[in-house]
Image: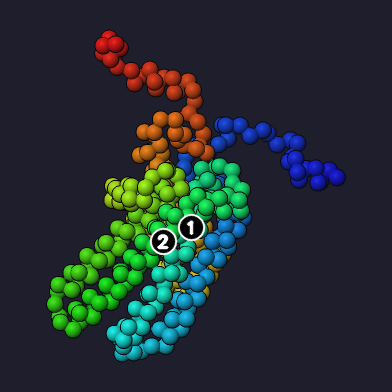
Amino acid sequence: MGLFTGFIMGKSNRPDYTPDMMPKNRLELFFEMLKLNLLNLLKLNLMYFVFWIPFWLWTWLHLQVLLNLSTENYTAFVQDGYLSVYLLGLVPCVLITGPAKAAMKYITRNYARDEHVWLWSDFLGAMKANWKQGLAMSTINAVFLYLFFFGLSFYSSMSENTGSYLYLFMQVVLVMMGLVFALMNLYIWPMMVTYDLKLTQILRNSMVLALGRLPWSVLFGLLTALPLVISAIWMPFLAWYFFIGYAFASFVNCSYTNAAFDKFFNSRIEGAEVNQGLRKPDPEEEEDDEWEDIDPDDEDDK
């Protein structure tokens, strides 16, 4: 009985949790929330992975063909239009993931700032609240994905056939556009579930943040892409996405965007809470800072 009571109520000699025990910086908050919510991230990943099953089945079906192609046959695979069929098939596969992705971002955003979550009900509620923008954004992503890979294939083929540097230049431009769009996606989804904005406003703000905070955007973009790079070298690592890959990447993403939104948006919105989950500054220090910020000339003008 004592063991059961201790499991429910905790140890009697453990000190009460106080505000001084809260994380004092973003890195501490990240690891503490990761440790606290690791099991829930595993559950969340399985919930979200269900929506990606059509994508993986469709890709695996064509991957088996591609792995057995020689260079000449691969060229024919592209030129005969089979690549276009594969890419067109990806469009609906990616499209259906949008509302679920918005829900996952909502859950991991809350985890990253130490907010309580009811996993199933909040996931379904976030899907219902954001399904329109989630579906619209996943449609944009799917169409962009198709045009991006089709354009790369087309310009590569034209460059080889004509020897013109123009098509090589177009490839470079397309790659740069693809990178910027990928970095925008770091901000689009967390912004979608955090603020009441139109999709055009979300896209514009995301582009500003992606380019304005380019070093940080690239860093977290690389962290997100790292499992794919490893999987390209060692394919069994794709199992990472089945277990925790999607949810973990989303948690890392939201841990970063929470800080970015606090700095550039929430600090400018009256009544918005900032630094959620972090230790609050000492009130005495806050009072001193407020006095130091007062300009005597301003006082006289009043």
Question: Which quarter of the rendering shows the C terminus?
Answer: top left
| Disc on res. 99 | 1
- Tell me if mark 2 has few (under 14), some (14-19) or many (20+) residues whose alpha carbon lies within 10 angstroms of its own: many
As drawn, 62 above or below 175: below
Which label number is shown at residue 290? none
In front of the other: 77 or 4: 77
The answer to whether residue 32 is left or right of residue 90 is: right
Would you identify the image quadrant in which residue 156 lies?
bottom left
State the scheme by which the image is colored: rainbow
* Residue 50 located left or right of residue 157: right
Residue 252 percent across, percent down from the top left? 47, 52
Q: Amino acid at mark 2?
A: Ser
Q: Residue at x 40, y 42 (%)?
A: 261
Name the residue rendered at 57%, 54% in the picture: 124
Q: Are marks 2 and 1 in contact (CB under 8 Å)?
A: yes
**Could you say whether the residue bearing mark 1 is in a helix, strand or loop?**
helix
Q: Please report the residue visible at 14 percent of the width from the left and 77 percent of the height from the top.
A: 164
Between residue 108 and residue 14, name the one nearer to us: 108
The number of callouts visible is 2
- Residue found at x 52% / y 45%: 110
Return the x and y of residue 60 as percentages of the image width and height. 48, 78
Residue 250 rendering spot, x and y as whole percentages: 48, 55
| 19 is higher (above) or lower (below) than 226 | above
- The residue singled out by tag 2 in the image is 138
Residue 130 in view, yes or no: yes
> Residue furthest toward the right?
1
Question: Is residue 152 depicted above or below 13 in this figure?
Answer: below
